[in-house]
Image (cartoon, grey):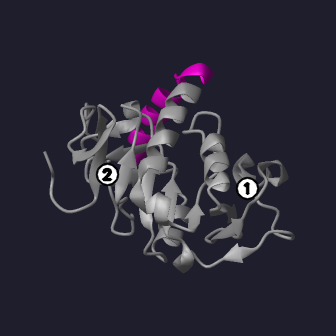
Amino acid sequence: MKIGNPPFWVEFESGVLTAGVGKKFFMSFTSNKIQAREFFKKSRDSLTPEQIQQKSQTIGKRCLQLPQVQQAKHIALYAATSSEVQTEQLFNALMKQGKNIYYPKVLSKTELGLFLVKDLKKLVPGSYGILEPPVDTALQISPTLIEVFFVPGLAFDHQGHRLGFGKGYYDRVLSQTKALKVGLTFSAQLTSKLPIATHDIKMDLVLSEG
């Protein structure tokens, strides 16, 4: 069942890509982002490393099935924390396809830059302990040139809203691009409604393993 124009959920049945209402919308948070962050972080952190790896592999395969990904040349990805959807295998697959892949780096209290990455081993711990490109050796790109932007999050709702950690980095950089915005998440992080603000940027698609 379609739910109108994008943003919309992406579900896979028998290997077929379809748009529709997700099956895991079990809770609604309408006003309290702090409460929602606590709930979904606890939920995500309860996954074992084996579960995270297995679910991430499924999500990565679904990313590669997107026509927009197959056609894109410039793709933004992210270095995952231990409990986020892992992206190393997706990076390797995209590199084999000849894509230019860019990772975010915190440049200031308000700015997130995007830098070309060809080797994950060259990423270094940056702000908040997240691996980032070394700014002195990596090529920076304007967000306007990104064609597909993969985005992590603590949770997503069925309207495409994203719940992050509240710093606003992704909302600011996503507001500068017309790229296809794809949220990557585990099915346990999907909910019917999240608290939102006027500056929050919606996803065009949300992919999970469910």
Report the residue marked by disc 2.
195
Q: Which mark is residue 127?
A: 1
Which image quadrant: the C terminus? top left
The span picked out in magenta is 32-51
Tell me the distance, in whole angstroms, between the alpha carbons under discs 1 and 2: 26 Å
Please give the name of the residue rendered at 49% of the width and 77% of the height, measured from the top-left corner.
176
Please give the name of the residue rendered at 48% of the width and 69% of the height, measured from the top-left corner.
174
Q: Secondary structure at mark 2?
A: loop
Q: Is residue 187 above or below residue 47?
A: below
Question: Which x, y percent locates residue 140?
Answer: 71, 75
Question: Which x, y percent locates residue 160?
Answer: 32, 54
Q: Is residue 111 above or below residue 29?
A: below
Dot 2: within a 10 Å radius of its alpha carbon, few (fewer than 14), some, or many (20 or more) residues? some
Label 1–label 2 contact, CB within 8 A: no
Which of 190 and 66 lies nearest the eye of the viewer? 66
Kind of residue sitting beneath label 2: Pro
Taking the image as drawn, is residue 79 in sight? Answer: no
In the shown orientation, is residue 94 left or right of residue 46? right
Please give the name of the residue rendered at 15% of the width and 50% of the height, measured from the top-left corner.
2
Dot placed on the residue nearer the N-terminal end, 1 or 2? 1
Please give the name of the residue rendered at 54% of the width and 33% of the height, measured from the top-left corner.
57
In the shown orientation, is residue 127 left or right of residue 160? right
Residue sitting at the far right: 136
Q: Which mark is residue 20?
A: none
Q: Main secondary structure of the magenta part?
A: helix
Kind of residue sitting beneath label 1: Ser
Q: Is residue 107 above or below residue 205?
A: below
Dot 1: within a 10 Å radius of its alpha carbon, few (fewer than 14), some, or many (20 or more) residues? few
Which image quadrant: the N terminus? top left
Question: Which x, y percent locates residue 207?
Answer: 40, 44
Residue 3 inside the magenta-drawn segment:
no
Residue sitting at the far front: 97
